[in-house]
Amino acid sequence: MKAQTIQNAAELRKIVERLAASTPVTDMHTHLYSVDFEDSLLWGIDELLTYHYLISESFRWSEDSYEAFWAMTKREQADAIWKKLFVDHSPVSEAASGLITILDRLGLDVSSRNLEEYRRNLAGRDLRGQLDTVMKLAKVEHIVMTNDPFDAAERAVWLDRGGNTDPRFSAALRVDALLNNWPQAVRELKQLGYRVEEAWTEETRGEVRRFLSEWIRRMDALYLAVSMPGDFVYPSDDHRSRMIDEAMVPVCREHGIPFALMIGVRRSVNPGLRLAGDMSMHSDVTAVEALCRRYPDQKFLVTMLARENQHELAVLARKFRNLMIFGCWWFLHVESMVEEMTRFRVELLGTSVIPQHSDCRVLEQLIYKWEHSRSIIGRVLADKYEKLHGSGWYVTEEEIQRDFDDLYHRNFWRFLGREAR
Ligand code: FIX
Ligand code: ZN
């Protein structure tokens, strides 16, 4: 049976808009946790206002010392940020306008501008209910966490309290210290009982592999993940290349999981800002090229932080099917960049990309991060379908739905080689 033809451009755009806004999402990189992890799952108005994106923006308007800010209680910090970014100035930045989207979609009266009212309302909710509400509003079906065994609080949940029990959440094993701060990783590994030393010995390599394998199994990790500075070079006669070649890639292959690389961050350019003090950095795409070429049967999920790297990275994905590019990361998660990146990614790669992840650190952020991105992705796709329409290629609603299913969740699970959860 021939699927029904969409009549005209206006109808086409309406259908695309609806499906862009409603298709369920797998959020493949977040800093959110299931309630099993208790305090690790941040939520509520004071956490939203003290999001590190907003902290750095609020200091643009402040002459106070960083120490004075950090000495305040969370609530006082939230009050100060509210005043600077929402009362004294209009909340037009992505992160600030995102908070307005959140409050409105949660049913609060944004026109009242009454922070105390918002605080009372959100504090009166229970976390499990709020998790359900937010996932429903954002239409996020599945959330991938960022899981670090060197975090003592998190480790205790995995080791002593049964780990994650919420089927809507999956783990990703995060291994930054192993690649970026080896002396610290050695100390941590020793404390956990692994026989490692700073010299790259046969025994150390074996123990690192054992550590990775045990934690992948324990967490049922979907992928191994690391963030890297822009000066990451591969291959090289250095610790990172040895760690990747002799421990990480072999273990990923053994477990059949992708290796996710988030490249282009320069940590702590302003230490006074703490988590808010990281910067973006131009990266060398040839490192990813070399990895994809050397390991054709290993899959790599890659995102980069510098705008300047995005086009080259998308071109590289045309050359290597074991490379999946994902998301508009951090400073790129602003409307103009999402639009630009989504447009040329689709023009270069069709729908074979993962256009967005949220990187949420606070539960309710799922609402704005996904709503804002969905409308941009929808607009880009609508333009493309409309162009096809003009030449007489009429996409059906089923085909549009198929494309959004690919973009929002199926490409990720297919790349993993797993059934969608
Ligand atoms: O390394 C990462 O996973 C980054 O996303 C974070 O460290 C960063 O602080 C962040 O929240 C970006 O959105
Ligand atoms: Zn992140």
Image (cartoon, grey):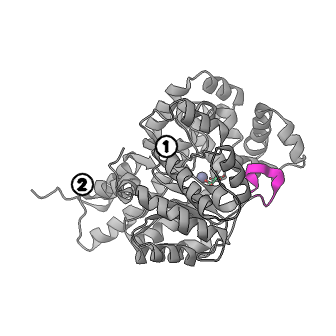
Residue lying at 69% horizontally and 58% vertically, measured from the top left: 197
408 up-or-down from 310: above or below: above
Residue at label 2? 398
Q: Amino acid at mark 2?
A: Glu
The spot of residue 416 in percent (x, y) is 39, 56
295 up-or-down from 192: above or below: below
Residue lying at 81% horizontally and 58% vertically, measured from the top left: 270
Q: Magenta segment, which residues?
A: 268-278
Residue 269 colored in magenta in the image: yes
The spot of residue 85 in percent (x, y) is 74, 45
Asked whether, in this view, residue 155 is left or right of residue 16, the answer is: right
Residue lying at 37% horizontally and 58% vertically, measured from the top left: 411
Q: Nearer the viewer, residue 227 or 52?
A: 227
Residue at label 1? 219
349 up-or-down from 147: above or below: below
Q: Amino acid at mark 1?
A: Met
Q: Main secondary structure of the magenta part?
A: helix
The spot of residue 90 in percent (x, y) is 71, 47
In the picture, which quadrant includes the C terminus? top left
Q: Residue furthest left?
A: 1
- Label 2 sits on a secondary structure element that is helix
Q: Nearer the viewer, residue 342 or 269?
A: 269
Asked whether, in this view, residue 337 is left or right of residue 79, the answer is: left
Disc 1 crowd rating (10 Å Cα; few below 14, some 14-19, many 20+) is: some
**From where the camera sits, is residue 91 visible?**
no
